[in-house]
Amino acid sequence: MLKWFCIFSAFTIFISSCVVRQPNANQVSFVSEENTGLIRVHVAGIGKNLPEIEQDAKTKVFESILFVGLPSSSTEAYRLPMVENKAEMQTHPALKIFFNNKEYDQFITRVDRLEYLKQRVTGGGRVLNFNITVNHTALRRYMEQNQVIRKFGY
């Protein structure tokens, strides 16, 4: 009986150490405002290789700024989403171009990879954490010029 208990315990410990966990659902969070209009954001990117992981992180940052906001920010301008109605605006031609042509890269001033070991996630991918600095003021101006948002808000 003791033999089976030891085997079962060893098997349970082995399985629990091999379990791959999905990263936290809230993968984008406000870190700080470095200068007026420059915000630093923490994000977890998921992918199979480093370029794919970094691209995923960048996309998540801008999707969060535009459609969700950064709830951990103390400033209302960053806490609220830039675009009022996500369902309507996702089909806006300027936003399609913005994401498909990776125009968001011009608003990124700095990308810092926080770790070098990629952690496994479900589905065979890997996850890395980044701090990305975004020029929020220039992004807002770009969205105004392309008529995604109005000058004084939504």
Image: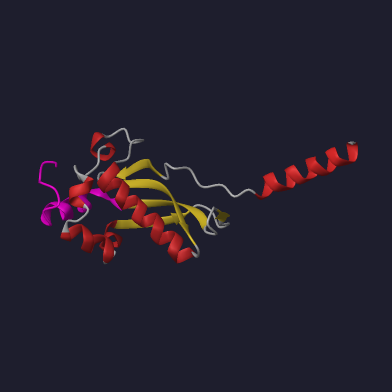
Image coordinates of residue 110 in percent, x first then y, are 37, 56
Task: Specify the quadrant that holds the C terminus.
Answer: top left
Q: Is residue 29 left or right of residue 81?
A: right
| Residue at left offset 30%, top offset 61% | 105
Residue 28 figure quarter: top left
| Residue at left offset 36%, top offset 56% | 58
Residue 83 figure quarter: top left
Image coordinates of residue 4 in percent, x first then y, are 86, 41
Image coordinates of residue 133 in percent, x first then y, are 35, 51
Report the magenta residues as a range.
134-154
Task: Specify the quadrant that holds the N terminus.
Answer: top right
> In this figure, what is the number of numbered marks?
0
| Residue at left offset 74%, top offset 43% | 13
Q: Is residue 138 left or right of residue 30?
A: left
Q: Is residue 56 above or below residue 87?
A: below
Q: How is the image coloured?
A: secondary structure
Image coordinates of residue 124 in percent, x first then y, are 55, 59
* Residue nearer the viewer, 39 or 76: 76
* Residue nearer the viewer, 39 or 125: 125
